[in-house]
Image: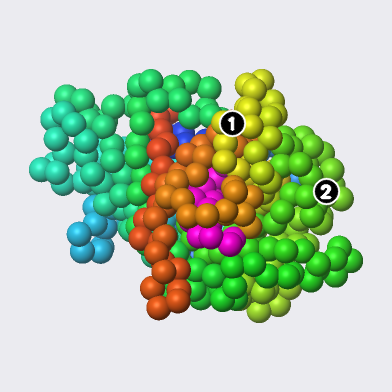
Amino acid sequence: MSFAPQIKIPATYMRGGTSKGVFFKLEDLPVAAQQPGNIRDQLLLRVIGSPDPYGKQIDGMGGASSSTSKTVILSKSQQPDHDVDYLFGQVAIDRAFVDWSGNCGNLTAGVGSFAISNGLVDPSRIPENGICTVRIWQVNIQKTIIAHVPIVNGQVQELGDFELDGVTFPAAEVQIEFLDPADDDAEGGAMFPTGNLVDQLVVPDYGTFEVTFINAGIPTIFLNAEDLGYQGTELQEDINSDPAALSKFETIRAHGALRMGLIADISEAAQRQHTPKIAFVAPPKTYLSSGGKQITEADSDVLVRALSMGKLHHAMMGTVAVSIGTAAAIPGTLVNLAAGGGEREAVRFGHPSGTLRVGAQAIQENGEWKVKKAIMSRSARVLMEGWVRVPADVLAE
């Protein structure tokens, strides 16, 4: 019996924010995978090590969590006044499925750095020392993101003293601006797809919940922790070790997706794991973070716990941070009310690994809320670069 040889593909393994992923230049992919479709999905699944019934991704680059089962494809931008086109693929762990329905805000922090280091940004726009402003077109959500990347001696500065809760070591700060983050033209319609800041969501077998549906950064469903029987101080194992709780969250998420107009039938939710996200909020309390750091009541304005790909996230997804900042800035949403209500241009929220500050400016135009941009700081670092190897038969139809 003969077996197909392995092929090798140029790739970079990067941490961005509290996530890790495999980054590719579009032109470096095999020709058959340079277009969307089954072959591209097969390739990325094999790179990451999915589907894996053991849930470990041992035979691939994935880290067996939603934060580490990620892929990025970058190319010179086809959009005017942009440097790089950024396409994100969230790879399922136990299923043969790549979700292209949303962005990864954490890995966005690595996009600017990769683009500069790999010739996707015009050299004339890169200072010898200072800040390089990289204009990113996020292909999945059709939005502009600006990354402010520090440069020293013409090279990307990766190390520094910026500390990000959920990341062990400090690094250089990368400020990210999400321009016009509300997905007004996306599936589900306006920033508040039902037209309401708070809705009643009926979930068969579980009851009725107060929710805020919002399309900003990424479609997100916010609930009150108290309504779910939680404090808002929960860590990963408190949720992820409880199959009944995970099933309940997924059922709520599916019915929320239907109300948001993201799916036409409840059965479609299983094939749309990346979006919408689901999160619960609570007023500030003192708790011990997953790293053993005490977060006092005074350290945050609101507590938020969010689930990604069916599990509680160890920190916070960057895109949901945008949703949190946007919702907090708009009086009357569940996030805003949990943070004490009123108008605000920034919020510091507590998550399982610590705290994070995100800013957003909201204005009301013709009775509708608009957010021009949301801002937060992340960091990024190259962990490994070279080639990733996969069996050649992944390129077969």
Q: In which quadrant will I find the N terminus?
A: top right
Q: Amino acid at mark 1?
A: Ala
Q: Residue 170, image x and y in percent?
A: 44, 22
Which kind of residue does numbered mark 2 sit on? Gly
Q: Which residue is mark 2?
A: 229
- Residue drawn at (45%, 64%) of the image: 182
In x, y percent, where is residue 17?
47, 36
* SS under mark 2: loop
- Image coordinates of residue 371 in percent, x first then y, are 40, 61
> Which quadrant would residue 202 be assigned to in this image?
bottom right
Is residue 388 among the parts visible in the rendering? no
Query: Which class describes the residues within 10 Å of circle 1: few (<14), some (14-19), or many (20+)?
Result: few
Where's residue 101, x and y in %?
53, 62
Closest to the observer, 303 or 116: 303
Decide which of tag 2 and tag 1 comes sooner along the chain.
2
Task: Report how far apart the C-alphas of labels 2 and 1 lie in the structure.
Answer: 23 Å
Left-right relation of 25 to 245: left
Determine whether, in the image, residue 43 is placed left or right of residue 253. left
Secondary element at image label 1: helix
Q: Which residues are magenta?
A: 315-333
The mark closer to the camera, 2 or 1, is 1
In this rendering, is residue 171 above or below 263?
Answer: above
**At 52% from the left edge and 55% from the top edge, which residue is drawn?**
342
Is 382 drawn above or below residue 24 in the view shown? Answer: above
Is residue 128 on the magenta stretch?
A: no
**Which residue is situated farthest in the right direction here?**
205
* Residue with the mark numbered 1: 298
